[in-house]
Image (cartoon, grey):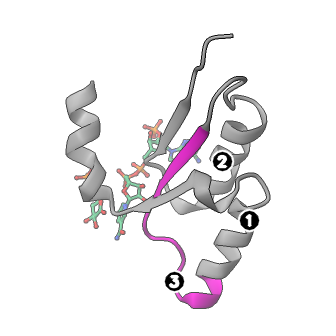
Amino acid sequence: MRVANRLFYLSIPPNIFIDGVKCASTSTSAANGWTRVIVEKPLGRDSESSAALTRSLKQYLDEDQIFRIDHYLGKELVEDLS
Ligand SMILES: NC(=O)C1=CN([C@@H]2O[C@H](COP(=O)(O)OP(=O)(O)OC[C@H]3O[C@@H](n4cnc5c(N)ncnc54)[C@H](OP(=O)(O)O)[C@@H]3O)[C@@H](O)[C@H]2O)C=CC1
Ligand SMILES: O=C1O[C@H](COP(=O)(O)O)[C@@H](O)[C@H](O)[C@H]1O
C-alpha cells in the first residue's frame, strides 16, 4: 500500500482545538503513514491551563505528533502553499 502521510495545520481558536484534533485523529488519520497536527498559540493562559490542554491533546495524539508554533511563524509558509 502507498504511504500517505497527513499533516493538519489547525489555525483555529483554542476553544475548538480539541474538537479539531479529535477529528484529525479519529476520523481522518493516515491509514498508511504518519498523522501530525500543528496547533498555534495561545496554548493556555498559564502552566496549569497549558498542562490541561496538553492532557486533552494526548487523549488523541502522542507527543511526537503534536507541533506547537506561533501563528506568524507558519502563516507565510501556508499562504505560499495555496
Ligand atoms: N495572541 C495570540 O496568540 C493570537 C493568536 N491567534 C491565532 O491565530 C490563528 C488565527 O486567528 P483568527 O484569524 O483570529 O481566527 P478566527 O477566529 O477568525 O478563525 C480561524 C478559523 O477558525 C474557524 N473557526 C472559528 N471558530 C469556529 C467554530 N466554532 N467552529 C468551526 N470553525 C471555527 C474559522 O472559520 P470561519 O472562517 O468559517 O469563521 C476560521 O477558518 C488562530 O490559531 C489563533 O489561535 C489569533 C489571535 C491572537
Ligand atoms: O498570533 C496572532 O495572530 C492573529 C491573526 O493574525 P492574521 O494576520 O492572520 O489576521 C493576530 O491578530 C494577533 O495579533 C497575533 O498575535
| Amino acid type indicated by mark 3 | Arg
Residue found 26% across the figure and 27% down from its top = 81
Residue found 26% across the figure and 47% down from its top = 75
Q: Are marks 1 and 2 in contact (CB under 8 Å)?
A: yes
Q: Which residues are magenta?
A: 35-49
> Which label sits in the foreground, 2 or 3?
2
Q: Are marks 3 and 1 in contact (CB under 8 Å)?
A: no
Per the image, label 3 sits on a secondary structure element best described as loop
Per the image, label 1 sits on a secondary structure element best described as helix
Query: Any magenta on residue 42?
Result: yes
Residue found 69% across the figure and 23% down from its top = 32
The answer for how far apart the CA atoms under marks 1 and 2 are is 9 Å
Q: Quadrant of the C terminus?
A: top left
Query: On the image, numbered disc 1 is attached to which residue?
Result: 56
Q: To which quarter of the image does residue 15 belong?
A: bottom right
Q: Is residue 58 above or below residue 51?
A: above
The answer for how far apart the CA atoms under marks 2 and 3 are is 19 Å
Query: On the image, numbered disc 3 is attached to which residue?
Result: 45
